[in-house]
Amino acid sequence: MLRNIAVSLMLLGHCLVPMVLCGCGASIQRQGTEQLLLSDSVDQAIDQLDLSGLAGRRVYLDTEYMKTFKGNNVYINSDYIISALRQKMTTTGCQIETNRTEADYILEARVGALGTDTMEVTLGIPSSNGVGAAASAITGAGAVPAIPEISFGKKNGVLGVSKVVVFAYHRETGVPVWQSGAAIARTDARDSWMFGIGPLTRGSVYDGVTLAGNRINPPFAKTPKQKQVKPLSIADRHQYVHPAVLEHQLAEAKEQKAQVEQAGHEQSSADASAVNTAGSAKLDGTPASAAPPSAASPPPPVPPAGAPPTAAPVATPPK
């Protein structure tokens, strides 16, 4: 048994020698890469927001439901997302108001996801100490060193994910005017090794492909396609009413209300004037219902003195 183990270790050593001679590299820490992944995913998610409907309007950014979100990363947290949203509002043409009561529209935002996922794939035999433990248990000999990783290819990667949701409503009336739906963005960084040579670094946060930190132009490399932001479905994004239409409707409603109030005021003034006129007539002793004689109907003529009274016409009976 010991002889077999020794032979296996010798074969393992012969396999590892060419791999060591080829060279090998490893990624020790990826904190900067993870920060790039998170910040780029946040920027891409916010770039999906279409705030053109609020351009030229006074908008207040409500971050009440984002202040408590800090995330696992020290730098990419709610403060970074708030600043990115303010920049998006500025570039769109929104007039940012720091006082809620002075704004016409409220833009409320929240964060649905902000984090990274890690994956690793090994083409070969991963490192293990199971054989050494089994041999030590059977023979009673000392502990056998663990078998190192025997692979001709290896690949690992980190994926950054972020999700931002925003909606807007009219401050005075609370009428919803717009909602973004789920703005989701993903970024990636991948490292790969082949026969111990590497790492070959690629991903959305890198400018090209690098080998052990040096930029290269690999043959038959696929040109990365530019990501086109597709419009979301009706269920995810919906324009309730355009702010211009809402403002026009509110202006018409205010104008109609002012007209109704003015008509009511005029009617009240007329009624008060009629009451005052009636009260003045009672004080003078003249009945309010008596109307002065009209000039269009002159009084009947008076017969001269001494003239006989005019006889009334007599009706002639029919023959």
Image (cartoon, helix red, strand yellow):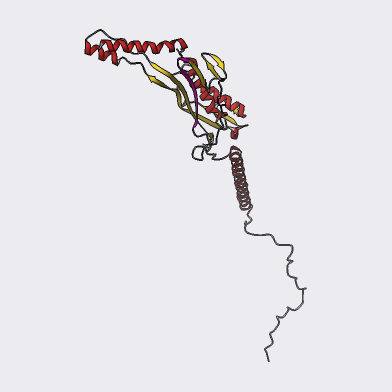
Q: Is residue 244 magenta?
A: no
Residue found 69% across the figure and 59% down from its top? 292
Q: Nearer the viewer, residue 68 or 188?
A: 188
Residue found 41% across the figure and 10% down from its top? 17
Quadrant for the N terminus in the image = top left
Q: Residue furthest top?
A: 142
Q: Is residue 194 magenta?
A: yes
Residue 297 on image: x %, y %: 73, 66
For the question of whether residue 137 can be seen, the reply is yes
Q: Above or below — where is 52 with respect to 205?
A: below
Main SS, magenta region, reads strand
Q: Residue furthest bottom?
A: 319
Answer with left or right where residue 124 lies relative to residue 49: left
Residue 18 on image: x %, y %: 43, 12
Answer with left or right where residue 312 lies relative to residue 272: right
Question: Which segment did they paint magenta?
Answer: 180-197
For the question of whether residue 70 can be seen, the reply is no
Answer with left or right where residue 208 lies relative to residue 21: right
Residue found 33% across the figure and 16% down from its top? 128
Residue 139 on image: x %, y %: 22, 11
Quadrant for the C terminus in the image = bottom right
Residue 221 on image: x %, y %: 55, 24
Q: Quadrant of residue 206?
A: top right
